[in-house]
Amino acid sequence: MAIDLINFESLGERLARIRRTYGESIDLPDLGRAVFASLIGISPIAYASYERGEREPTIDFLVALRKKTGVCLVELIDPNHAEPNRPFR
């Protein structure tokens, strides 16, 4: 059985897209990494490393991201998954 590895660079690109889309949904189209990290409840340094694809996001971060944005974590982790992301709340 083959296990697909997560491409952290493309995951980082999806995180950046989520941050920008979320910013637009709350009328902050220029929402930066540091403010978004604050909204999620993690350090700006940790978030930036996730978005740059340098580190693997923690489960706690993914849960906090899901709670804050409503994003489908399966689609975040697997961009080939057919279920679309849910709209932001």
Image (spheres, rainbow, N blue to C red):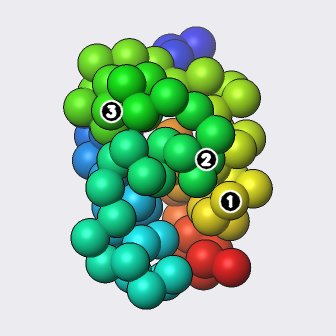
* Residue at image coords 42%, 72%: 23
Return the residue nearer the eye: 46 or 87: 46
Residue 50 falls left or right of residue 26: left
Q: Name which residue type carries label 2.
A: Ile
Q: Mark 1 = which residue?
A: 68
Q: Secondary structure at mark 3?
A: helix
Query: Counting other residues with Cα less than 10 Å from the Cα at mark 1, is it few (<14), some (14-19), or many (20 or more)?
Result: some
Tell me the number on the disc at residue 40.
2
Q: Name which residue type carries label 1.
A: Lys
Q: CA distance from mark 3 to mark 2?
A: 12 Å
The image quarter containing residue 88 is bottom right
In this rendering, the answer to whether 81 lies above or below 31 is above
- Whichever of labels 1 and 3 marks the residue nearer the N terminus, that label is 3
Q: CA distance from mark 2 to mark 1?
A: 7 Å
Q: Mark 3 = which residue?
A: 48
- Whichever of labels 3 and 2 marks the residue nearer the N terminus, that label is 2
**Residue 48 at what x, y percent from top left?**
32, 32
- Whether tag 2 and tag 1 are in contact, CB under 8 A, the answer is yes
In this rendering, the answer to whether 60 lies above or below 41 is above
